[in-house]
Image (cartoon, rainbow, N blue to C red):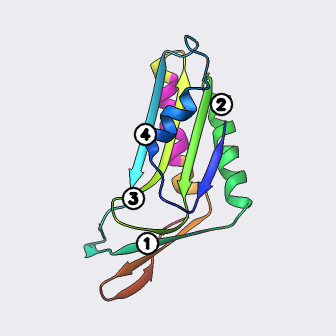
Amino acid sequence: MPVKLVAHRFDPWAELGAYQEHLAPGRYGACASFVGTMRDFNQGEAVEAMFLEHYPGMTERELERIVAEAGSRWDFLDALVIHRVGEIQPGDPIVLVAVWSAHRRPAFAACRFILEALKTRAPFWKKEKLPSGARWVEKNT
């Protein structure tokens, strides 16, 4: 159940397809996925770019704990989490969360749990580039 942090633009749909190819066909009946992309606005202001800081090692461990916790709550076969770090442009994918299970309910529930937990628990800090300068996003992890 890989967790990857990447400092380059990625294609979430290509990643999802490539990863799913290694899963045994017929073992899963559902894949729930979420892709989050960068907006060009926040808090009523235009945003030109964003820099996403993290603690190398610590961030991955927390994401792995979140996926493991989801696995203790729901019966699923596999999960994939890919998250951007570094400079991100509007429209770029930031996060992919995918969960495969035999049935849709655990796939949806685990996918949502992983996403919501990473938004509140994973150590990421966002610095936005605005036309008027830069600011750190308040109320972020």
Please state which of residues 61 and 89 is positioned toward the viewer in this rendering.
Answer: 89
The residue at which mark 4 appears reads as 13
Q: Nearer the viewer, mark 3 or mark 2?
A: 3
Q: Nearer the viewer, mark 3 or mark 1?
A: 3
Dot 3 and dot 1 residues touching (CB under 8 Å):
no
Tell me the quarter of the image containing the C terminus: bottom right
Q: Is residue 26 magenta?
A: no
Q: Amino acid at mark 3?
A: Asp
**Whole-Å distance between the Cαs marked 2 and 4?**
23 Å
Tell me the quarter of the image containing the N terminus: top right
65 relative position to 42: left or right: right
Choose the circle earlier in sequence order: 2 or 4: 4
**Whole-Å distance between the Cαs marked 4 and 1?**
22 Å
**Where does residue 104 sit, x and y in percent of width and height?**
45, 20
Choose the circle earlier in sequence order: 1 or 2: 1
78 relative position to 87: left or right: right
102 relative position to 33: left or right: right
Dot 1 and dot 2 residues touching (CB under 8 Å):
no
The residue at which mark 1 appears reads as 50
Label 4: few (<14), some (14–19) or many (≥20) C-alpha neighbours in 10 Å: few
The secondary structure making up most of the magenta span is: helix
Q: Amino acid at mark 4?
A: Trp
The numbered dot on residue 71 is 2
Q: Evaluate whether residue 83 shows in this view.
A: yes
Depicted 31 relative to depicted 140: above or below:
above
**Region in magenta:** 106-116
The residue at which mark 3 appears reads as 92
Choose the circle earlier in sequence order: 3 or 2: 2
Q: Amino acid at mark 1?
A: Met
Choose the circle earlier in sequence order: 3 or 1: 1
Quarter-wise, where is residue 23 in the image? top right
